[in-house]
Every structure is written in structure tokens, then in C-alpha cells.
Amino acid sequence: MNRPGHDAIASAADLVDRGVCWLGRAVSWLCLAMVLLTGFVVVLRYLFDQGWIWMQELVTWMHAAVFMLAAAYTLSRDEHVRVDIFYRKLSPRGRAVVDTAGVILLLLPTCGWILHTGIGYVTASWSMAEASRETGGMPGLFVLKTLIVITPVLLVLEGIAFVLRAWLTLPDAAGTERN
């Protein structure tokens, strides 16, 4: 038996999941691009004695994008770091309680702190159209720094969806599974 609003809550959690998963899969292609570009940089440097700072920085930028944009994807797949000594032995309800506590006590405050401290940093970077300090480096460093704000927002959204999913999939009092 569905509770009122159950379908709307489940739909909202699914929408967040779909968006985060799409982004995670899209960003994963940057791993291949990093490998290929790094190989190209090595070939240019050691075979042709050529090198471009912007190309090396681009590898670093892609790595940052993968790390920061895939964090919420990792949470959505339930592959984040967890001390699993007791968790695996818990009932579904116990796991939901632990997941909820983790999101409320750890994830949300951490994301709040990152947003609070990072927003000024990102705003300052945008206001001066910050670029690489290196001669021949990448322009538009402010775009990369924007990930400092995007990452915690994605993590908060996925954390909420994670908790909702944990509670919505519990068996109800009658012992039947919810949809």
C-alpha cells in the first residue's frame, strides 16, 4: 500500500539519480581522454622535444572534473567509502538509519562548509576571469573552480535521494514491499 506522496518522492529521487548517473557516465569518458592526452604529451616531449603547458594543464583539469563530478555518481551507486564492519550485518531498517545519520551528520555539514568557504573563492575567480598563472597555460580557470560549488550541490541532492530511496524501499508494516 502506498502512502500519500510516495510516488512523487520516489519520482524526485529517481530524477536526481538519472541526472547524476548521466553526468557520471559522461564524465567517465574523460578518463580515456586523459590517458590518450597524457600519451600524446609524452610522445611530443620525448620524441619531438615539444611540450605545451596548456596540454598538461588540460589533463589536470580533466582529472579534477572526473573526481569532483563523479563523487555524487559514486554515492548514487552506493560505492562510496563506508566502514562495513557492522553495516553489512544490519537489517534494511538499520542500514537506512545508518545511511540517514551519515548524510545528516557527515555529508550535509561537509557540503555546507565547502559551499560556505568556496563560494567567495569561486566568485572572486569569476570576477577577475582567472586564468592559469603559467605562460601558455589554460585560460578560463574560473570555469574549473566552479566545480567547487557544483560538487557539494550534486552531493547534497544525491545524498537526499540516497536517504529517500533507503526508506522508500523498506517493507511496510503489512510486510509487503513498497513500489
Image (cartoon, rainbow, N blue to C red):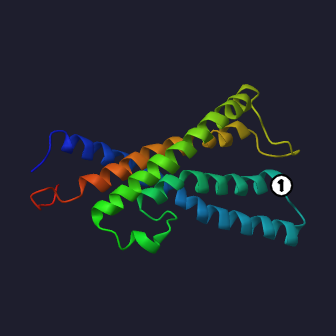
Q: Position of residue 87 (x, y in %)?
A: 40, 69
Given residues 23 and 124, the one toward you in this image is: 124
Say if 87 sits above or below 179 in the image: below
Residue 149 in view (yes/no): no
Image point 68% across, 41% down: which residue?
145
Residue 122 in view (yes/no): yes
Residue 33 in which image quadrant: bottom right
Image point 54% across, 43% down: which residue?
109
Given residues 151 and 94, the one toward you in this image is: 94
Residue type at the position of mark 1: Trp
Residue 119 in which image quadrant: top right
Q: Which residue is mark 1?
A: 52
Q: Is residue 75 left or right of residue 48?
A: left
Q: Position of residue 45 (x, y in %)?
A: 86, 66
Q: Is residue 93 left or right of residue 108?
A: left
Q: Element at badge 1?
A: loop
Say if 108 sits above or below 119 in the image: below
Given residues 60 and 52, the one toward you in this image is: 60
Given residues 77 and 170, the one toward you in this image is: 170
Q: Position of residue 60 (x, y in %)?
A: 72, 55
Mark 1 Cα shell of 10 Å, populated few (<14), some (14-19), many (≥20) = few
Image point 80% across, 70% down: which residue?
43
Residue 117 in which image quadrant: top right
Say if 84 sits above or below 126 in the image: below
